[in-house]
C-alpha cells in the first residue's frame, strides 16, 4: 500500500507541480493517474521512488516513510517503466533486463537465465535477447522496458506513459498484455497516462488530476463514469468519448448505429426498434425523435444508466 | 639547391642513426614526451571533465579557463616557466600540458553532455548509484567524444613538442634548432618531415581507436566534433 499524506512539490523555479495531495493506493491493484500534460502526474509518480522529493508532506510504503529510506536501495526494489523505454543503448536486451538484479548482487548467470524467462513473460521471443535496443521496434522496446521493470520482482511497478509512443494497434496489444500480466502477478501498479480510455481500461482505481496535482475525482472507472464529480471531470471523461456518442439511424435496409462523425459503428444486438433502444438508452423526451441520441456514456462499456445521470 | 632532396638524403644517411643524437632515439624521445604529456593532461582534464559532465556544475568556469588556456602562446609560457624553474624538462612538460588540457576537457564533458538525458534518468530511476551511472552508462557512451579530444590534444602536442628542444635536449625539435643554428636546412627539413610522419602515424592510430570505442548498439553518426559544443558554450 502506498500512501500520500498532504504531499506538495514546489520546484526551485516556483512551479507548484503537486499541491496538498493525499491518496491511498491499494496493494495489488492498478491505480491510474490521468490528467492533461503538466498536471503533475510524472512528479507524483517519481516521488514514489524518490526521483523527486516532496517539499512537504510524506509518502509511506506499507507504513514506512520513504523519506527515511536510502533512494538507491528504494529504487532497486521498485520497477520503473517509462515512455521511450529508457533502455541502455550500449547493452543487449538481455543485459538491460539483467542490469538491476546484477547490481543487487545476483550472479550474472542466474540474472541472465531469469532475464530470458522475463522475455517470455512479456511476450518477447528469446531470439531478440542478443539484439541491441536500437535494433528493436518501439513496441518491442517497451516490452523490454516492462521486463526490466519486473526483473527485481518488485511489489510496486511505476509506469509513466509507457505506451504513449507506440502506434494504436501495438498500444492496444500492450495494454491487453499488461492486463494479463497484472492478473498473473498482482503487482501494485501506478500507471500514468493522459488517455482517459487507457485509464478506464487498466485502472482499478482512477485518479483524475487537474493542473497542480489537484485531485478532481478518485474512483473506479464505473463510479467516475456514473457520477462525474463536476463539469471538469464530465468534460474530461466526455471529451475523448464524444467521438463515440452513438445514435440510431433508420435506413431502408434496417437500423444502424452511427457515431458523431457520421461513421457507421454497428447495429444494436437484439431489438432493432428505435423506440425500444431509446427507452433503454436515452432520455424519455427524445423517445419520439427519429434520430436517437444516446447518453454520453453509450459505447463506453459502463453500466447502463437507468435515469437521468445528472 | 633542392632542399627536399637534401632532406631525404639526410633522412637516409646511416650516420644520422648512430650516437646520442640518432634519429631513432629522437623519435622515441619525441613520442615518449608526447605520450607522457598526454597522460599528465588527461589525469587533470578527464576527471574534471567527467565531473562537469555528470553534475553540470562548474561548466562556465571550465569553459572560460579552457578558453584562456587555448589562447596562451605556448612558446611564451614555455619561456616563462623555464625562466622560473630553469632549463630542463619541467618547463616543456608544464607548457604542453596546459596546451593539451582544453581539448581533453572539452572531449570529456561534451561526451557526457551529448548523452540522452532520458537514458541517464532511466539508469538512476532503476536504481543505479551515481558512481555506477558514471562507470556503466556515461563513460562507455562518451568514449568516442573523449577519444576525439585525446586525438586533437595528441596532434597539438606532437607538433608543438618540437619546442621542448628550445629548453631541453629532447625530441625531434633538436634537429630543427641545431639545423637553424648551423644553417643546415637539410637537417631542419628532415626533422620537420619526421614530426609530420609521427603526427600522421598517431592520427591513423586514433582514427582506428575512435572507431573501436563506439559502443556496439549505438547508432553510427554520433557527433564527433568536440569543438562544436565547446564553441557554442563559449559564446
Ligand atoms: N524539474 C522541474 N523543474 C521545474 N518545473 C518542473 C520540473 N518538473 C516538472 N515541472 C513542472 O511541474 C508541472 C508538472 O509536471 P509533470 O509532473 O511532468 O506533469 P505531467 O507528467 O502530468 O505532464 C509542470 O508545470 C512542469 O512544467
Ligand atoms: Mg509526464
Image (cartoon, helix red, strand yellow):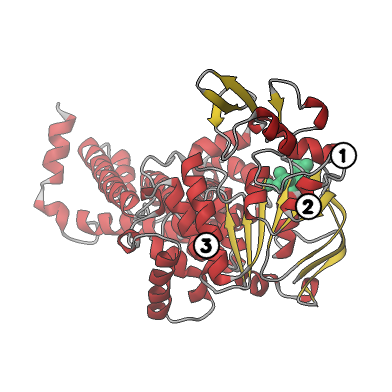
For this view, does B146 lie left or right of residue B134?
Answer: left
* Image coordinates for residue B150, horizontal then vertical, percent: 42, 51
Disc 2 residue lies near ligand 1 with CB under 8 A: no
User: Contact (CB < 8 A) between labels 2 and 3?
Assistant: no
Q: Nearer the viewer, residue B156 or A238?
A: A238
Give me the residue at 55% from left, 31% from top: A265
Which chain is mark 2 on?
A
Give me the residue at 83% from left, 41% from top: A307
C-alpha gap between disc 1 and disc 3: 35 Å
**Upstream in sequence: badge 2 or badge 1:** 2
| Residue under pointer 2 | A223
C-alpha gap between disc 2 and disc 1: 13 Å
| Residue B86 visible, this angle | no
Residue A117 sits above or below residue A197 on the image: below
Q: Quadrant of the C terminus of chain A?
A: top right
Q: Secondary structure at mark 1?
A: loop
Residue A268 sits above or below residue B107 on the image: above
Mark 1 or mark 3, which is nearer to you? 1
Q: Secondary structure at mark 3?
A: helix
| Residue under pointer 3 | A180
* Image coordinates for residue B185, horizontal then vertical, percent: 24, 35
Which chain is mark 1 on?
A
| Residue under pointer 1 | A310
Which dot marks residue A136? none
* Image coordinates for residue A191, horizontal then vertical, percent: 66, 56
**Upstream in sequence: badge 1 or badge 3:** 3
Q: Nearer the viewer, residue B94 or A23?
A: A23
C-alpha gap between disc 2 and disc 3: 23 Å
For this view, does A11 lie left or right of residue A75?
Answer: right
Which chain is mark 3 on?
A
* Image coordinates for residue B167, horizontal then vertical, percent: 44, 52
Amino acid at each position: 500500500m502506498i500512501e500520500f499524506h498532504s504531499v506538495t512539490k514546489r520546484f526551485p523555479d516556483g512551479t507548484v507541480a503537486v499541491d496538498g495531495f493525499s491518496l491511498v493506493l491499494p496493494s495489488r491493484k492498478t491505480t491510474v493517474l490521468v490528467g492533461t500534460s503538466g498536471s503533475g502526474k510524472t512528479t507524483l509518480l517519481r516521488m514514489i521512488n524518490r526521483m523527486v522529493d516532496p517539499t512537504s508532506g510524506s509518502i509511506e510504503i506499507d507504513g514506512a516513510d520513504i523519506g527515511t529510506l536510502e533512494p538507491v536501495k528504494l529504487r532497486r526494489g521498485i520497477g520503473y517503466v517509462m515512455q521511450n523505454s529508457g533502455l541502455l543503448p550500449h547493452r543487449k536486451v538481455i543485459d538491460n533486463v539483467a542490469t538491476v538484479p546484477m547490481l543487487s548482487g545476483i550472479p550474472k548467470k542466474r540474472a541472465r537465465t531469469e532475464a530470458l524467462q522475463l522475455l517470455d513473460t512479456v511476450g518477447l521471443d528469446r531470439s531478440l535477447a542478443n539484439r541491441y535496443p536500437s535494433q528493436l521496434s518501439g513496441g518491442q522496446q517497451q516490452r523490454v522496458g516492462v521486463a526490466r521493470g519486473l526483473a527485481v520482482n518488485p511489489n510496486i511497478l511505476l509506469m509513466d506513459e509507457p505506451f504513449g509512443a507506440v502506434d494504436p494497434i501495438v498500444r492496444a496489444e500492450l495494454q491487453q498484455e499488461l492486463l494479463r500480466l497484472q492478473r498473473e502477478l498482482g503487482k501494485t501498479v501506478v500507471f500514468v497516462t493522459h488517455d482517459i480510455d487507457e485509464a478506464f481500461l487498466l485502472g482499478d482505481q482512477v485518479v483524475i488530476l487537474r493542473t497542480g496535482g489537484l485531485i478532481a475525482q478518485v474512483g473506479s472507472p464505473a463510479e467516475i463514469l456514473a457520477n462525474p464529480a463536476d463539469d471538469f471531470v464530465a468534460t474530461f471523461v466526455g471529451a475523448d468519448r464524444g467521438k463515440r456518442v452513438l445514435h440510431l439511424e433508420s435506413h431502408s435496409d434496417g437500423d444502424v448505429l452511427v457515431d458523431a462523425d457520421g461513421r457507421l459503428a454497428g447495429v444494436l444486438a437484439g431489438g432493432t426498434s428505435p423506440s425500444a433502444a431509446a427507452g433503454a438508452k436515452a432520455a424519455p423526451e427524445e423517445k419520439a425523435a427519429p434520430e436517437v441520441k444516446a447518453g454520453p456514456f453509450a459505447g463506453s462499456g459502463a453500466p447502463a444508466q437507468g435515469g437521468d445521470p445528472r | 639547391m633542392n632542399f627536399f632532396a637534401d632532406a631525404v638524403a639526410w633522412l637516409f644517411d646511416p650516420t644520422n642513426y648512430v650516437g646520442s643524437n640518432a634519429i631513432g632515439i629522437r623519435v622515441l624521445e619525441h613520442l615518449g614526451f608526447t605520450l607522457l604529456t598526454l597522460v599528465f593532461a588527461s589525469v587533470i582534464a578527464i576527471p574534471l571533465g567527467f565531473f562537469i559532465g555528470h553534475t553540470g556544475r562548474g561548466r562556465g568556469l571550465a569553459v572560460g579557463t579552457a578558453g584562456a588556456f587555448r589562447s596562451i602562446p605556448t612558446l611564451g609560457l614555455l619561456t616563462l616557466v623555464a625562466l622560473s624553474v630553469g632549463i630542463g624538462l619541467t618547463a616543456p612538460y608544464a607548457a604542453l600540458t596546459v596546451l593539451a588540457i582544453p581539448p581533453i576537457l572539452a572531449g570529456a564533458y561534451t561526451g557526457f553532455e551529448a548523452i540522452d538525458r532520458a537514458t541517464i534518468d532511466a539508469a538512476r530511476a532503476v536504481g543505479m548509484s551515481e558512481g555506477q551511472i558514471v562507470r556503466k552508462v556515461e563513460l562507455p557512451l562518451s568514449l568516442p567524444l573523449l577519444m576525439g579530444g585525446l586525438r586533437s590534444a595528441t596532434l597539438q602536442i606532437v607538433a608543438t613538442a618540437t619546442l621542448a628542444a628550445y629548453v631541453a635536449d629532447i625530441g625531434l625539435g633538436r634537429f630543427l634548432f641545431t639545423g637553424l643554428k648551423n644553417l643546415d636546412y637539410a637537417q631542419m627539413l628532415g626533422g620537420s618531415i619526421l614530426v609530420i610522419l609521427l603526427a600522421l602515424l598517431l592520427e591513423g592510430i586514433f582514427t582506428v581507436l575512435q572507431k573501436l570505442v563506439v559502443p556496439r548498439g549505438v547508432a553510427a553518426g554520433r557527433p564527433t566534433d568536440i569543438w562544436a559544443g565547446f564553441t557554442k558554450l563559449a559564446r
